[in-house]
């Protein structure tokens, strides 16, 4: 009996002892877990610091460390892709400069040749007139090209940020039509706008007008005399689609993507003046304001360019 | 930087003499941030290709490397975790859970991975995709275009590095398609995603940075897109 009493009196001590032991073990385990986790985190951070993207910590395991490693990789991926984006932009600009010098060569050497002939002075007055006209037209071409290039380089280098604001599209469209009315009239081309309700769209009016102008000028250039150009505006649920349709020489399906490339001229446009910049610019402008552009065409039947601009949130 | 590549990829079904070569030696390399369209007729092997790239199916031969991981070396469990974290899928028939609301459908993959929902990010996606008003609706209350937008939001929710879209506009009329595509392109740019889209519609493929034509399980033509 006395023994039992002794045991009972010791019980609290035994319990406390067990509790302390359990606690110590738990603390040790926690410590080990924390140390392991911290080691893993450190390893991940080391990888990031070393810009080493071959992080091999069980990436597809279903635990916290693997999740961390995965997120670390994503961060690295985003930075690497931003760096390569910057590199690509640099290459684009270098390419632009080399393309530009190349494109300007021909008109410049023509001007130089014509003026040499004029300076020699052995030409009849008729011939003189002829060469002067040619010099003028080459100069105009250069003028046109420099204008385009300036706009393009500003957009491309990001020197100009488009500032899309909530504003009515009707005025943008009308302003751009009015700037091409004169050249359309020269070819007796009708520009027909299907009636539409004005709608507020997120867009930068000045640059959107530029994009519309480029497409309208093309439509006029490649249309036959007495032709017609139709413009329609159609709201979708997230975008509004502005379509410009002409019935000129058209574009072959195989060229649908090529025509938006810098300096690309369609196979069938050899006899038309042009710089190969207009559609390229239009596509960049649309992209910079979160829109896009699509083309559809059947040669000598129709050519439609659709510009998509974001609707304003209600 | 290549984020995804496939080398000598083959997928054969059946045995000689009735062997079907769904994929017959395909090599692909996709850069981070690129938008690639794979165009081909039905039966050309384009969906099989997408399934291989997303780790939904295993190739007969060849390898797929996504973000440095060779998929064929992973177990099924690892593949499941890999897909959940790295790949967003958008299918032709939306595959939304009918008894969950729009919001619940969108955050489902995040909850499956046992993560907390990044509310600001999800709100931004919902807003970008024009779904704010439909947040609490059930999928059957939505139009096809809206349902596909929910599917896109769900694919973006886990911030995957790659978005794989299999005929995302296959069930939509041409107007709705243009809407959905614009949004796909815009969001993938905005959220730094690489996108591979399968389509039989060349008109739609115009939006891509690069177009790959596939026929009889082989790449027959590769053209740069607008850039």
Image: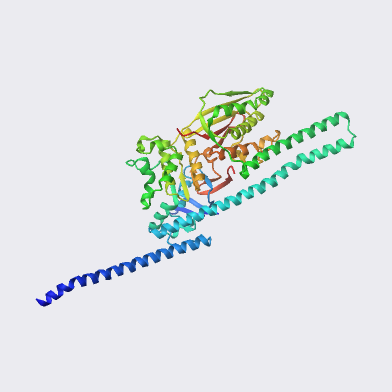
Q: Quadrant of residue B209?
A: top right
Q: Residue furthest bottom?
A: A3
Q: Looking at the image, which residue is at 37% across and 47% down?
A: B108
As drawn, is A107 to the left or to the right of B159? Answer: right
Q: Is residue A258 above or below residue A71?
A: above
As drawn, is A227 to the left or to the right of A242? Answer: right
Residue A256 can be seen in this image: no
Q: Is residue A51 above or below residue B162?
A: below
Query: Residue B224 location in percent, x, y?
Result: 59, 45
Query: Residue A251 location in percent, x, y?
Result: 61, 34
Q: Quadrant of residue B102?
A: top left
Q: Residue furthest right?
A: A122
Taking depth in this image into account, of A290 and A292 the one nearest to the observer is A290
Report how many numbered discs are placed on residues in the image. Answer: 0
Q: Is residue A68 above or below residue A137?
A: below
Q: Residue furthest front?
A: A9
Taking depth in this image into account, of B136 and A121 the one nearest to the observer is B136
Q: Looking at the image, which residue is at 73% across and 36% down?
A: A143
Query: Residue A74 location in percent, x, y?
Result: 48, 54
Q: Is residue B152 above or below residue A52?
A: above
Q: Quadrant of the N terminus of chain A?
A: bottom left
Q: Looking at the image, which residue is at 57% across and 46% down?
A: B221
Residue A47 can be seen in this image: yes
What coloring was used for the rendering? rainbow
Q: Quadrant of the C terminus of chain A?
A: top left
Q: Quadrant of residue A4?
A: bottom left
Query: Residue B204 location in percent, x, y?
Result: 52, 39
Taking depth in this image into account, of B38 and A210 the one nearest to the observer is A210
Taking depth in this image into account, of A166 and A191 the one nearest to the observer is A166
């Amino acid at each position: 009996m006395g023994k039992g009493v002794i045991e009972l009196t010791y019980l609290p001590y035994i319990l406390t002892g067990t509790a302390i032991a359990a606690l110590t073990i738990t603390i040790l385990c926690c410590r080990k877990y924390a140390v392991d986790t911290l080691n893993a985190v450190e390893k991940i951070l080391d990888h990031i610091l070393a810009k080493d993207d071959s992080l091999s910590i069980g990436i597809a395991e279903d635990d916290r460390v693997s999740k961390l490693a995965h997120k670390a990789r994503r961060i690295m991926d985003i930075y690497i892709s931003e760096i390569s984006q910057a590199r690509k932009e640099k290459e684009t600009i270098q390419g632009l400069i080399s393309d530009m010098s190349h494109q300007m060569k021909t008109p410049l050497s023509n001007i130089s040749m014509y003026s040499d002939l004029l300076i020699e002075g052995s030409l009849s007055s008729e011939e003189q007139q002829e060469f002067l006209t040619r010099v003028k037209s080459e100069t105009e071409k250069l003028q046109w090209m420099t204008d385009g290039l300036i706009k393009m380089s500003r957009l491309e280098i990001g020197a100009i940020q488009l500032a899309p604001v909530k504003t009515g599209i009707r005025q943008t469209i009308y302003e751009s039509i009015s700037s091409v009315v004169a050249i359309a009239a020269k070819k007796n081309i009708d520009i027909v706008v299907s009636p539409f309700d004005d709608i507020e769209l997120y867009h930068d009016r000045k640059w959107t007008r530029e994009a519309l102008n480029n497409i309208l000028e093309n439509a006029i250039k490649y249309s036959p005399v007495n032709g017609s150009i139709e413009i329609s505006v159609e709201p979708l649920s997230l975008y509004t689609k502005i379509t410009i349709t002409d019935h000129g020489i058209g574009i072959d399906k195989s060229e649908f993507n090529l025509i938006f490339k810098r300096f690309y001229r369609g196979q069938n446009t050899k006899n038309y003046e042009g710089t190969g910049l207009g559609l390229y610019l239009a596509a960049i402008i649309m992209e910079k304001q979160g829109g896009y552009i699509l083309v559809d065409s059947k040669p000598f039947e129709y050519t439609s360019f659709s510009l998509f601009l974001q609707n304003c949130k209600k | 930087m290549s984020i995804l590549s496939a080398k000598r990829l083959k997928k054969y079904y059946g045995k000689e003499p009735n062997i079907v070569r769904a994929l017959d030696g395909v090599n692909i390399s996709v850069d981070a941030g690129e938008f690639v369209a794979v165009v081909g007729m039905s039966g050309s092997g384009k969906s099989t290709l997408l399934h291989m790239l997303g780790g939904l199916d295993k190739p007969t031969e060849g390898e797929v490397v996504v973000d440095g991981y060779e998929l064929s070396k992973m177990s099924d469990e690892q593949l499941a975790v890999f897909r959940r974290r790295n790949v967003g899928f958008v299918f032709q028939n939306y595959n939304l859970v009918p008894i969950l609301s729009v919001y619940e459908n969108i955050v489902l993959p995040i909850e499956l991975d046992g993560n907390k929902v990044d509310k600001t990010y999800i709100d931004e996606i919902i807003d970008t995709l024009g779904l704010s008003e439909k947040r609490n609706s059930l999928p059957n209350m939505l139009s096809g275009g809206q349902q596909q937008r929910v599917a896109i939001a769900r694919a973006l929710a886990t911030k995957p590095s790659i978005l794989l879209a299999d005929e995302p506009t296959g069930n939509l009329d041409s107007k709705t398609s243009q809407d959905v595509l614009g949004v796909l392109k815009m969001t993938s740019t905005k959220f730094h995603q690489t996108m591979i889209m399968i389509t039989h519609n060349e008109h739609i493929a115009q939006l891509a940075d690069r177009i790959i034509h596939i026929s009889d399980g082989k790449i027959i033509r590769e053209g740069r897109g607008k850039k």
